[in-house]
């Protein structure tokens, strides 16, 4: 009863000239009970909307061109990164306090080139094949690293032994259901301990268009988008894994890219084709990390002092708020 | 009488404790000695029966006799067994002294098994125990989705390439790569005179930064552009003159370092400008 249109659209061919059809003003497409007709009317309505939108765009473009130089600047589309809630702990590059903190924190000895990083990679109990292979590949990526099997040893007892043997960092890869899913990174002479959730781990053979094996050269490190204080300290932790002087001959680069609190790790080989073009080829494993907690001392789940824990109820409330 | 009970429950009619499987019948009665559904191990079909059960780490011997068959509340008599394994075995023997061999033997076997698993429990609690954290499906799905979107938004390849080019511009690679920098020529020619003095100062700073790990916040690099321009122009100045002659030879020297062959200009193009003066005029 609410249709009131002349041609019957049930034929499928459809009537021509929709302008000639008149509807009562309170009519809406969703009121038609017949599904076929309703669908047809909806498609027609959609086409009309699209036409109008196109016409509007054209008009706006013409106006823009007509104005020429005086046209208002183009509107920047909103992205999540644009709309990000401003974090008050964002590091200003000239901040003296931050610089002072960094000069006196646990990584100062690394950044002053007093210590050479030596890394121990291990897993949780009884690692499965995938985790073992991942550990091996990680050991080739990070120079001066050693893989040891856990065999049921307690971390608290391993740590003093590591310190005695001059290790600077400890990486523990946690495994669940035959895939690695967590990473604990601990800077050893009582440095901070970061616990990450690891996802989308790709071994070398699963990467498409990959290059040959990584060589023994020391890779460069790229750390992107670590803006807040927390991000800064995590970034320094990652930087402290690699020796200070990269060998540019090797042309290898390890990247830790932070985007919306997810840290993507990639390992590439690059080549400069000209001064404006560079080609990169991915070798090596890749994975993404999400920080779960940062602890002040070495790994101690019971009595540790947590600098930062991810609390879902408090921190995940806003979609535009990121902590790293 | 027990025979009647067995002929009813055991074989023909329904017994709620009986569980049948393809190969065997089990008895779910908590007082059952062996766990199987047999004529000799059915606690309902035997008027004289005994079991060993443990509660909170202590083992008890339960006994049932014909005299108490009429009193269900007092049917099962229980005796605490000592913690010492041998003593407990002797106590079982004492209590079941004139009982059938089968029941005595099975009681002792059961007691042995129970003590063994209690020991294992105590050992395991001393070791590190895995803490099982339940995953919340909605949250897992949300995180995976957000990770994918973050990956798309990150545009990793272009970000890495940009960063590498930045480092090349800022001379962190030193003299390894030698590129003729045509593109900045025109822009830099304007600032020739001004920046010569500045560039020397900047060169010195730059040497310290070589090889030092930098935190690049990919967002703000407003100042760096100007610095780049200044540095590059000076290097380009030198190279411009030497460019056409020496670039070819330099590239030859450098190509072994780079993997795939870099194709530089195969021959030198030298332009001659001639002012056409027709001889007639």
Image: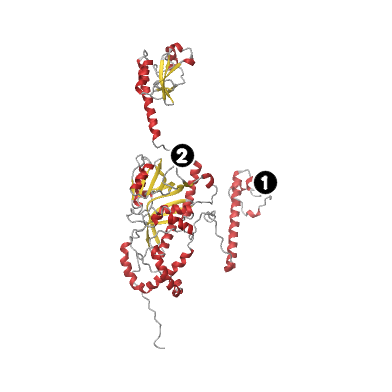
Q: How crowded is mark 1: few (under 14 residues within 10 Å), some or many (20 or more)?
A: few
Identify the residue position indicated by label 1 in the image.
A2
Q: Residue at x 39, y 81 (%)?
A: B274
- Residue A214: percent from left, percent from top: 34, 54
Report the quarter where the N terminus of chain B lies: top left
Q: Residue at x 63, y 43 (%)?
A: A33
Identify the residue position indicated by label 2 in the image.
B133
Report if the CB atoms under discs 2 and 1 are less than 8 Å apart: no
Q: Name above or below for residue A245 compared with residue A164.
A: below
- Residue B224: percent from left, percent from top: 46, 64
The answer to whether any part of residue B138 appears in the image is yes
Report the quarter where the C terminus of chain B lies: bottom left
- Residue A315: percent from left, percent from top: 52, 47
**Image quadrant where residue B96 sits:** top left
Q: Nearer the viewer, residue A218 or A189?
A: A189
- Residue A256: percent from left, percent from top: 42, 53
**Image quadrant where residue A53 sits:** bottom right
Label 1: which secondary element: loop
Q: Residue A221 carries which label?
A: none
Chain under label 1? A
Is B9 situated left or right of A73 in this image?
Answer: left
Q: Nearer the viewer, residue A210 or A6?
A: A210
Q: Nearer the viewer, residue A297 or B172?
A: A297
| Alpha carbon distance from label 2 to label 1 | 57 Å
Chain under label 2? B
Is A275 situated left or right of A19 in this image?
Answer: left
The answer to whether any part of residue B1 appears in the image is no
Q: Name above or below for residue A177 compared with residue B208.
A: above
Q: Nearer the viewer, residue B34 or A4?
A: B34
Q: How crowded is mark 2: few (under 14 residues within 10 Å), some or many (20 or more)?
A: few
């Amino acid at each position: 009863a609410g249709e009131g249109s002349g041609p019957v659209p049930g034929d499928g061919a459809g009537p021509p000239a929709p302008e000639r059809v008149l509807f009562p003003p309170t009519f809406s497409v969703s009121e038609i009970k017949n599904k076929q007709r309703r669908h047809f009317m909806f498609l027609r309505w959609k086409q009309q909307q699209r036409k109008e939108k196109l016409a509007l765009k054209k008009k706006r473009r013409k106006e823009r061109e007509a104005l020429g130089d005086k046209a208002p600047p183009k509107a920047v589309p909103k992205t999540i990164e644009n709309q990000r809630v401003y974090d008050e702990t964002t590091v200003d590059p000239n901040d003296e306090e931050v610089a002072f903190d960094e000069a006196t924190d646990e990584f100062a000895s690394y950044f002053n080139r007093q210590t050479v990083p030596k890394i121990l990679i291990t897993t949780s109990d009884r690692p499965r094949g995938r985790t073992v292979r991942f550990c091996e590949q990680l050991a080739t990526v990070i120079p001066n690293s050693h893989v040891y099997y856990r065999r049921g040893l307690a971390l608290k007892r391993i740590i003093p032994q590591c310190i005695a043997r001059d290790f600077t960092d400890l990486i523990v890869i946690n495994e669940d259901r035959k895939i690695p899913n967590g990473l604990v990174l601990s800077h050893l002479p009582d440095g901070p301990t970061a616990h990450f959730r690891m996802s989308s781990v790709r071994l070398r053979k699963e990467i498409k268009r990959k290059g040959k094996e990584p060589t023994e050269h020391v890779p460069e490190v790229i750390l992107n988008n670590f803006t807040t204080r927390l991000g800064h300290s995590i970034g320094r932790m990652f930087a402290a894994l690699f020796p200070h002087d990269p060998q540019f001959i090797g042309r290898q680069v390890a990247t830790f890219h932070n985007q919306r609190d997810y840290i993507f790790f990639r390992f590439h080989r690059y080549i400069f084709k000209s001064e404006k073009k560079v080609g990169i080829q991915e070798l090596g494993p890749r994975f993404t990390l999400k920080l779960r907690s940062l602890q002040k001392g070495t790994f101690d789940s019971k009595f540790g002092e947590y600098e930062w824990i991810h609390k879902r109820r408090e921190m995940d409330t806003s979609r535009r708020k990121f902590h790293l | 009488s027990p025979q009647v009970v067995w002929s009813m429950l055991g074989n023909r009619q329904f017994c709620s404790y009986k569980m049948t499987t393809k190969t065997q019948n089990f008895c779910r009665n908590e007082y059952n000695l062996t766990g199987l559904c047999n004529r000799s191990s059915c606690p309902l079909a035997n008027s004289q029966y005994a079991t060993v059960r443990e509660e909170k780490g202590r083992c008890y011997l339960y006994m049932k006799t014909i005299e108490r068959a009429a009193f269900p509340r007092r049917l099962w008599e229980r005796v605490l067994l000592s913690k010492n394994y041998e003593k407990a075995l002797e106590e079982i023997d004492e209590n079941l002294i004139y009982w059938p061999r089968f029941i005595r033997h099975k009681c002792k076997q059961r007691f042995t098994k129970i003590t063994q698993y209690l020991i294992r429990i105590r050992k395991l609690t001393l070791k590190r125990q895995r803490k099982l954290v339940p995953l919340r499906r909605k949250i897992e799905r949300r995180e995976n989705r957000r990770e994918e979107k973050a990956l798309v938004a990150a545009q990793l390849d272009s970000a890495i390439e940009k960063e590498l080019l930045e480092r090349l511009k800022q001379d962190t690679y030193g003299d390894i790569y030698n590129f003729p920098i045509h593109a900045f020529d025109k822009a830099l020619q304007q600032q020739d005179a001004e920046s010569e003095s500045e560039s020397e100062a900047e060169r010195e700073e730059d040497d310290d930064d070589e090889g030092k790990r930098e935190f690049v916040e990919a967002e703000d690099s407003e100042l760096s552009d100007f610095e780049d321009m200044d540095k590059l122009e000076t290097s380009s100045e030198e190279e411009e003159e030497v460019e056409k002659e020496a670039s070819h030879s330099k590239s030859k020297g450098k190509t072994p370092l780079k993997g795939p062959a870099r194709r530089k200009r195969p021959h030198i193009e030298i332009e001659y400008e001639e002012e056409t003066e027709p001889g007639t005029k």
